[in-house]
Structure formats: structure tokens, C-alpha cells
Amino acid sequence: MKQEYKKYMVLAGWMFVLYLCIRYWDRFINIVFLGIQAASPLILGAVIAYMLNIIMSFFERHYLKKCKFSVVISQKRIICMLLSFVSLAGIIFLIFQLVLPELVNCIRELLKKGPAVIEEIYLSLKDNTNLAGYMEILDQNIVLDQVMLEEKIEQAIGMLLNGVGGMMNSVFLAVTSLVSWVVTLLVGMIFSIYLLLGKEQIGKQIKLLICTYLPKYDKKIFYVADTINYSFHNFIVGQCTEAVILGSLCIVGMWICRFPYAVMIGVLVGFTALIPIAGAYIGAGVGAFMIFTVSPIKAVFFLVFIVVLQQLEGNLIYPRVVGSSIGLPGIWVLAAITIGGGILGIGGMLVAVPLTAAIYQLLREDVYNRRKVTAAVSKEIKKKTELKKV
């Protein structure tokens, strides 16, 4: 009776909490978002530590495995952690070093050639007999009077001066936001260092808490956590592998088609391909803009090339490389990306695939175990029935 009473009391408590959450939903959501915002440096640090732990574990398994120097062995964790930070920073620096200078040069070239190109297009349209009537109407509506143009410029300057106060306020908010972002990043980096240095000790403490306060569910919790960790780990590795494959194919294809900026655009497409399915189109847009400054026709052909490459990658390479690495069929990879992107955008795409893979694995194991138990029970019942007949 006491045990039944306790169960009903716990159930009533949870029902009351659920009622409060529904009744005061707006306040509850505000409290949740406030807690997330306050813990954002720690969440960012945990994400950084999880990603860097993949690289750090790789260094620990391979590069320092056969080292015999006592100093290196005693400081193995610190050395591998520093190597992981340096590797990640080096990759990011190399990508920006390849892309940004050329992108700035392309913008300069576009600003130089832009007016002449627009004028040339305008004159070619004006000389076209089929469009002559439309261009005359356009000429009538375009203000060519120098006095009118000067008045428009004076009005624009006056509006700019009147909006200096608002502009200063916007600049202040932008600087404040930048400082807040930098502080969040620094705190997150420091927290990630502590997590990487003491990951075994932290893991033992978490397991001890679960075994102490949830002894009935500890095995299930550990199994779910291991499945989620397996899915996210393999997803990150598979996503990076897929990005390298796509970037390499883009570079080779651009070399064959003789597009300009082949290496730079291939690196950019591979980097943005870390965003599932849609990421390559972001890099392709920047690449098409760069090629446009050299040849607009080649920019159009490049877009056709990247669409074909992306279809090949999205339907064949991505589901096989990423889907097979996390044990998720290709159709569910595409479904997870679609739903996750629709709900949370780019972040939803990154989280939806490994989370769906974990749910898929858990459901598959549960269905298999239930069917196994059901089959065993049916077999036992059949035996008993046959014995009764005998």
C-alpha cells in the first residue's frame, strides 16, 4: 500500500508540474531561455570540447602511442589537447587565407567593372529593335538632370546627418554585442579546456550520480547516452569526410572545365559543405560571384556544374558516406535534414541527422527485443498446448 501510495504521489506531483508549465507557458519559456542564455558559454564550451575530443583522441591513439620520453608521456593529455587546438585553428586560418584575399580582390574588380558592364548592357538593350519602345520609356523615367541629381545627394546627406544619433546607437549596440560574443567564446574555450583535461574524472562523477540516484534506470541511461554519443561522433567524422570528398570533386571538376579560382572555390565549397545538403550551395553562391567578375558566362556554367555536382553528392555520396557511418538509411537522412532545417535552420540540420540516427538505433533495438520476447512467449505457449493435447 505504501509503495502504491508513493507512486500515486509522484504521478500527482508530475501532473501538477505539467499543469503549471501549461498554465504559465510564457513565463516558463522565458525562464528556460534565460537559463539557456546564462549557460550559453558553458554549452558552447561543451560543444567545443566534444568536437576537439575527436581530434585529441586521434592524436592520443596514434602519434604519441610509441613515444618513450618520460616528459612527453607525463604530459600526453596536454600535448594532444594543444595539438588539437592548433590543428583546428590551422585549418580555419588556411581556409580564410585562401578565400578572403581573393574575395576582396573580386569585390574590387566588380566595383571597377560594374558601371561599365551596366552601361554596356543598357546600350545593347537600347539598340535592340524589339526593346526600343521599353527603353524610351525607361529613358523618360530616369533622372538625368544634374541639378536634380545634386538635390537628391543633398537630401541624402541631410538624412544621413539627421540619423547620426541612431547610427551611433546602432554602433554601440554592435560593439556591445561583439564584446559579449568574444567574452562568451573565451569563457567557452576555458571551460572546454577544463572538460578535456578532466574528462575521465567528470565521466566517473556523472556515472556515480546516476548509479546513486537512479539505480533502476542506470543501464538504460548509459545505453541511450552511448548510442547518442556513437551517432554524433560518427556523424561529425562522416560529415568532415563528405566535405573533403565534395571539395576535392569540385576542384577536379573546375580544373577540367577550366573555371577560374578552382582551388579556392573548391576549398570554400568543401568548408560550407559541413552544413548538410544546403551548405554547398552557400559556397557555390560565393564562388559564382567570384567567377562573375572574370566572366559572367562562366559563372552561369559554374552554377550548372555545381547543381549537377550537388545532386550527385546529395543523392549518392552523402547518404552513403554519412548515412552508413551512423547506421541511418539515406531516406531518413534526407527526411531529418528537411525537418530539422525547417524547425531550427542550419543548427537543426546539424543536430537532426545524428539525433534521428540515435532514435532509429534505439527503436530498432527495442523492436528486435520485443519481437524476440514475443516469439519466445509464443513458442512456450505452443509447447504447453501440445503437451496438453498429448
Image (cartoon, rainbow, N blue to C red):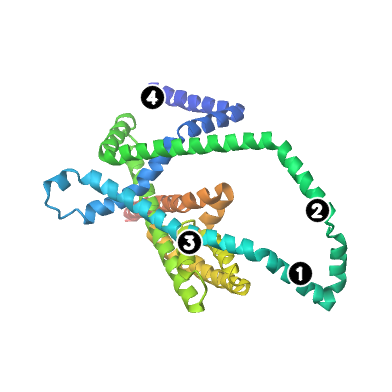
- Mark 2, secondary structure of its residue: helix
| Residue assigned mark 1 | 122
Dot 1 and dot 3 residues touching (CB under 8 Å): no
Q: Quadrant of the C terminus?
A: bottom left
Looking at marks 1 and 3 on the same chain, the residue that comes earlier in the sequence is marked by 1
Q: Mark 2 to mark 4: distance in Å?
A: 86 Å
In this rendering, which labeled residue sits more in front, label 2 or label 1? 2
Q: Nearer the viewer, residue 67 or 349?
A: 67
Three-letter residue code for mark 2: Leu
Determine contact: label 2, label 3, CB under 8 Å: no
Q: Is residue 43 above or below residue 333?
A: above
Quick one: label 4, few (<14), some, or many (20+) residues within 10 Å? Answer: few
Task: Please tell me the numbered disc located at residue 268.
Answer: 3
**Badge nearest the viewer, 4 or 3:** 3
Secondary-structure class at tag 3:
helix
**CA separation, marks 4 and 3?**
62 Å
Q: Which residue is mark 2?
A: 149
Q: CA distance from mark 1 to mark 3?
A: 33 Å
Q: Nearer the viewer, mark 2 or mark 4?
A: 2
Q: Residue at x 51, y 77 (%)?
A: 258
For marks 2 and 3, give the CA distance: 41 Å
